[in-house]
Amino acid sequence: MSDIESDVELELKNKKTLPQNIKNTIYDKIFRNVMIAIVVVIYFAFLNLGYRNIEPSVFATDLKVFSFAVLGLSILLLERGYKKDKEGIFLNGLETFAISFITLLMTHTYFFASERTRDLVSLSFLYIAIYYMIKSLIIYGKEVHRFRKQISDVRDIVGR
């Protein structure tokens, strides 16, 4: 192999590796999502503990209060994301809205639904954890794809 070939091969290898600043940006986004997932899982774990340990009438009131508090937070996030034109904040607002809806749905499910439905709803923290894991993988894939598309020479070659 000649020096030119090895230089070209080294240059291509360097172009394909993600720079540290882009890695840090990707890791920050993923870390933020993981932290949100942890908070949501803890929230639902406490709701499930409340179902088992709190008197039913008090628990129903607590669920309604939590639901409206989370709904208020989701409205704030939606407004903030819309005003600042940031899709990430807006998406977090939609996710928070879904969490408030699930919480409000729990008031009916825990007291009027069948045992099987109650079990499915009590596992909602697992569904949300899986959602955030998939979301983090998608964020990683999109960011790597965006970087690789940005460094691609194909547009330059085709344009000639």
Image (cartoon, rainbow, N blue to C red):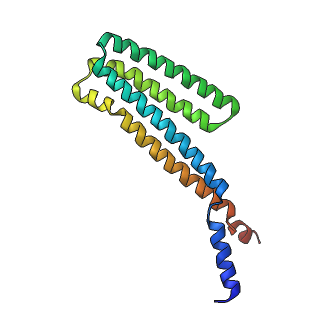
In depth, the one of 4 and 97 nearer the eye is 4
Q: Is the residue 143 above or below the residue 76 in the image?
A: below
The residue under the point 59% across, 27% down is 77
The residue under the point 45% across, 28% down is 99
- At which x and y percent is residue 152? 67, 65
- At which x and y percent is residue 88? 60, 38
Q: Quadrant of residue 151?
A: bottom right
Q: Is the residue 148 above or below the residue 104 in the image?
A: below
- Quarter of the image with the C terminus is bottom right
- At which x and y percent is residue 3? 69, 86
Q: Is residue 101 left or right of residue 74?
A: left
The residue under the point 31% across, 16% down is 54
Q: Residue furthest top?
A: 57
In depth, the one of 84 and 69 nearer the eye is 69
- Quarter of the image with the N terminus is bottom right
Q: Quadrant of residue 53?
A: top left
Q: Quadrant of residue 74?
A: top right
Q: Residue furthest bottom?
A: 1
- At which x and y percent is residue 71? 51, 21
Q: Is residue 80 left or right of residue 134?
A: right
Q: Is residue 153 left or right of residue 65?
A: right
Q: Is residue 70 left or right of residue 7?
A: left
